[in-house]
Image: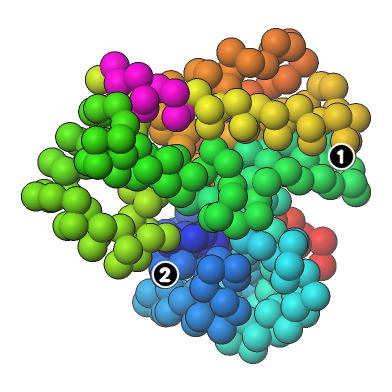
Amino acid sequence: MGIDGGGTKTDIVLADLKGTIIKKVKAGPASLRNTGIEKSCKNILKGIDKLSEVDGEIVSTFVGFPALQEEYSNRKEYIEDYLDKEISGDVKIGSDQLVAFKSGTESDKGIVVIAGTGGVVRGFNGEKSEKVSGWGYLADEGSAFWVGLKAYRKITKQLDGRGEKTLITEIVFKEWDLEDGNELNKRIYKNPIESLPELSIMVDYAQRGGDKIATRILEEAANEIFEGVELVAKKLNLYQFPLILVGGMFKSGFLEGELSKKIKDKDKINIIRPENDPVFGAVKLAISNYEEK
């Protein structure tokens, strides 16, 4: 079983030992930073309950958690024991960044960019690892939250008469069926961690419609991500490596294209958009752990 915890949802996949998918379900968020240890684990266990009707025995599970490798590294044993008591078979946990990386490559050298609700650039070179960004939704440059916050600020400036008119405002009001700025604020502040990332989708729509502000926001997101990739590569002395791009922000062809333009050595840096979701990296790690036992 492979599990990929996220800021807004958790993907859970059950597979056989050859990696053939048996069932895939979704559960609530499991970001240790945003949701906490207890709630994250309970959301995962609720999701696993949806697999109860599947025949067979779970022999190995790998769970990828956001923020585990950062401020929750000292709680790894506790979290692993918590889940091990509730899940049959061997249970291992690790970073969602490793899960995302493995979803796109078998190599132990390379860089993964996660640009979903949150964002991070993580590099691997054997046993060495370095990261840039990934501080949480108040930072996480290039993430859906970051893009959504920038869009919200542009919308409010337009509504006040302090800023340029942007197609983002028109799209948001239409998509969310809003009448005025007060309704916008009710929607945003009810749950900013969910609502602000949704705005990133409207930014992409507006960019496709030729909106200059939306274009600038996504260009800035690409710049931030590229700077992170450059810095991580420098820290790890990586010159020829796979660059794995995962997360909902890369559904924007413009963002991916802008990032690709900035990478000059395309003969040395292999940009990979995994065919499968990051959770399949967790499946691979669960199988690998079982085979090593």
Looking at the image, which residue is at 54% across and 55% down?
Answer: 137
Q: Nearer the viewer, residue 154 or 122?
A: 154
Q: Is 194 situated left or right of 93 in this image?
A: left
Residue 162 at what x, y percent from top left?
30, 35
Q: Where is residue 161 in the image (x, y as percent from the top left)?
A: 24, 35
**Quadrant of image for the C terminus:** bottom right
Point out the tag, 1 or 2, that comes first from the N-terminus.
2
Q: How far is disc 1 from disc 2 in space, using C-alphas?
A: 32 Å
Dots 1 and 2: beta carbons under 8 Å?
no
The foreground one among 97 and 277 is 97
Residue drawn at the location 16% of the way across and 43% of the way down: 173
Q: Mark 2 points at which residue?
A: 28
Camera-side residue of 181 and 91: 181
Overall secondary structure of the magenta section: helix
Mark drawn on residue 125: 1
Mark 1 nearby-residue class (10 Å; few <14, some 14–19, many ≥20): some
Secondary structure at badge 2 equals loop
Q: What is the three-letter code of the residue carrying label 2?
A: Gly
- Residue located at (62% from left, 61% from top): 66
- Is the N terminus in the top left, top right, bottom left or bottom right quadrant? bottom right
Q: In this view, does 66 lie above or below 89?
A: above
Quick check: 95 above or below 169?
below
Q: Give the magenta range.
A: 210-218
| x and y percentages locating residue 257 in the rendered image | 50, 18
Q: Quadrant of residue 202?
A: top left
Q: Residue 3, which numbered label?
A: none
Judged left or right of residue 87, residue 277 is left
- Please rate how many residues cluster around mark 2, counting C-alpha atoms within 10 Å: few if below 14, some from 14 to 19, many from 20: many
Residue 11: x and y in percent read: 47, 60
Evaluate whether residue 40 shows in this view. Answer: yes
* Residue 200 appears in view: no
